[in-house]
Amino acid sequence: MPARSSPAPTAAPAKPATPALSPAQQALRKLGLVRDIDLALHLPLRYEDETRITLLKNAREGEVAQIEAEVVSSEVQQRPRRLLKVVVDDGSGRCELTFFSFYPSHLKTLAVGARLRLRGEIRGGFWGRQMLHPAFRQAGGELPQALTPVYPTVAQLPQAYLRRAIASALQRVALPETIPAPLLPPLAVFDRQTGLQGPWMLRDALHFLHHPQPDVALATLEDHSHPAWQRLKAEELLAQQLSQHAARQQRARLRAPVLTPGAQDLPGQLQAALPFALTGAQQRVVAEINADLALARPMHRLLQGDVGAGKTVVAALAALRAIEAGWQCALMAPTEILAEQHFGKLVDWLTPLLAPLGLQVAWLAGAQKKKERAAMLALVESGAAALVVGTHAVIQEQVQFARLGLAVIDEQHRFGVAQRLALRQKLSHQGMEPHLLMMSATPIPRTLAMTYYADLDVSTIDELPPGRTPIVTRVIADSRKDEVIARLAPQLAAGRQVYWVCPLIEESEALDLSNATATHAELAAALPGVQVGLLHSRMAAAEKKAVMQAFKDGALGLLVATTVIEVGVDVPNASLMVIEHAERFGLSQLHQLRGRVGRGAAASACVLLYSVGDSGRLGESARERLQAMAETTDGFEIARRDLEIRGPGEFLGARQSGDALLRFADLATDTVLLAWARETAPVMLAQHPQLAREHIARWLGGRADFLKA
């Protein structure tokens, strides 16, 4: 009997290939427009009125008008540059159209005898009416019944495609009301059909804003004061408040180590050893932090204080509270220079207290050698490292804490939310979260704290230690740069030290700014006999450290630096700072830089050199920033003005998450809606939890986790 052959193995059925996305679909994803609700909430930037035809004789100069006219001449001109000139006549007058860029297909559409529908700004000229690059298409067809929306978009995503995608999504998307009727915001509008006042429903508001009727006052759409816009802003603010309050409730259910005072009283020993006494504000915030650490739920507290207010010593006292309770503390800073400065201070302060207990302060940074890093990781894992100081290296996977009880994040807005979350999850293997203390020298304006930090407790150090000298700020055009350099010599001769800050490391074609290297050479040549140092972010860590140490030791009289010296650097003998191209810096960054001087007894000054560029004048926001710097050194006032100028993104570290956290609402003008959202959120969570979850999912999607960080 012949041997039975084995059946040939059957190939696994091939998975159907995922169809490749078109460039337009990829562009939609780039904008975050994935769900139907995402498209529905992608609202127009502005509108075009294509609902009516205007006769040329009735069109006013400067207005955007839509006309229907016949082409009477069409000519490509080669001099002085290649352009297309077309003349059209609508029976009431003629208009000349100019196109600086055009394609062969345009020549066909714009041929003599063609009847066109054109839309553009009417201009007057020597030869009569003109339009520059108007939109055009063949005449005919019914006029739209609503204003035409113009949406925010990116390359590869034409307006026509985006309009179709949004119109289609609006037809499909379910928009049930998630706000119970008794809790709706007090917004009403006159209903023309019924003659009754009634609240705007979400579906009505969205459909209206995508396709408003031509008789609506355009100003109310542009400034977002229309009741339909108000309804959208109320919904958005409520989603944000619901997310924050829900995060606070979730955190209250989590467990954290209870950090009670120990018999050694390490914080008391540190205070007794310090050469200065804590200010009243420092004592108050220490008490607030200690009260949180004694609870079995995770502290989630922001410690804010102006530059030089003494946040580091408060963090040290909190760390000692954790250590004497038998737990570890981690302190993470955004730059190696700042982390090293913290490490140096904390080693000096804490080593005399920790060494007798067999504990030490460990250092973790990306630039560490392998052997040194391995030794530090072993100390952290064993628990012998009671305090771990470092950069992003602290949150890497291989860093295993024995008992992490407290995490401190300095300049928290400089970290992405994923990084902040990673540090909080270092205790998850024990089913707990560490207490979290975030520090910021960028004070949070009250409206921002109310909005974005509804789930966060805020402690404020609102007084500076005694002995800090006031800083005089001068705003000077860079045409007087030589005068400024000449005035450096007497300061340096008197033994003072100077920072000179530049925005770029090397030349950029896009931004015609001085670079640090060229400025270093220029100042060294202009100030013979003065030791001029150079510090920028592309230098090796050891080189940066050596330069900074030489400046601290007084071996360098002048330090030319990029913004790596923005935070944390403490040289009491430095009494003058010059910031070149100050108009290019953000307000909070200028304030941080200025905080590097005025740390000693000598009178200190900050000079803001600005350039007007080709325009011959400063932009409005740049002028406001420099004016604010000249008028106040109060970090809270600076923060308030910064919020007005830039909005909330920078305060929150929102850039790192890639999302604008408020798209429609304005914290400065929508205070009534914000108050309503703050009152409504806890009521909804308590009485309508399912609707609250649906509301958060609709508005925030996956971004809700970012708000918890």
Image (tube, rainbow, N blue to C red):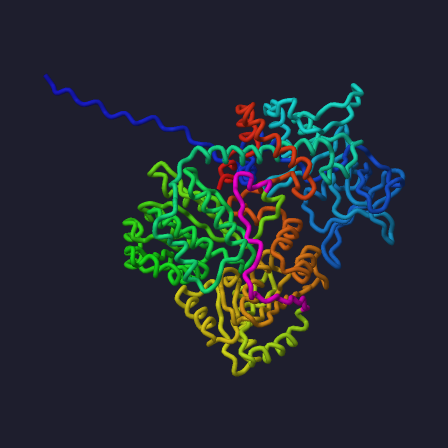
Query: Compared to 691, does 472 lie above or below?
Result: below
Residue under the image location 56 percent in, 32 percent down: 242
Query: Compared to 432, does 328 lie above or below?
Result: below
Q: Can you name the residue that lies furthest to the top here?
A: 1
Res 678 quadrant in image? top right
439 sits to left or right of 666:
left
Residue under the image location 55 percent in, 38 percent down: 32
Q: Can you name the residue that lies furthest to the left here?
A: 1
Per the image, is 475 magenta?
Answer: yes
Q: Can you name the residue that lies furthest to the bottom here?
A: 529
Q: Judge by depth and name the residue closer to the eye, 658 or 180.
A: 180
Q: Judge by depth and name the residue closer to the eye, 56 or 505.
A: 505
Q: Position of residue 634 (x, y in %)?
A: 62, 57
In this orientation, does residue 253 appear? yes
Residue under the image location 69 percent in, 36 percent down: 672
Q: What stretch is highlighted in magenta?
A: 450-477
Q: Position of residue 575 (x, y in %)?
A: 56, 71
Q: Position of residue 627 (x, y in %)?
A: 69, 60
Q: Quadrant of the N terminus?
A: top left
Q: Judge by depth and name the residue closer to the eye, 286 or 404.
A: 286
Per the image, is 143 magenta?
Answer: no
96 sits to left or right of 539:
right
Q: Position of residue 156 (x, y in %)?
A: 58, 42
In this orientation, does residue 517 appear? no
Query: Compared to 636, does 7 lie above or below?
Result: above
Query: Compared to 602, does 259 lie above or below?
Result: above
| Number of disc labels | 0
Residue under the image location 85 percent in, 38 percent down: 90
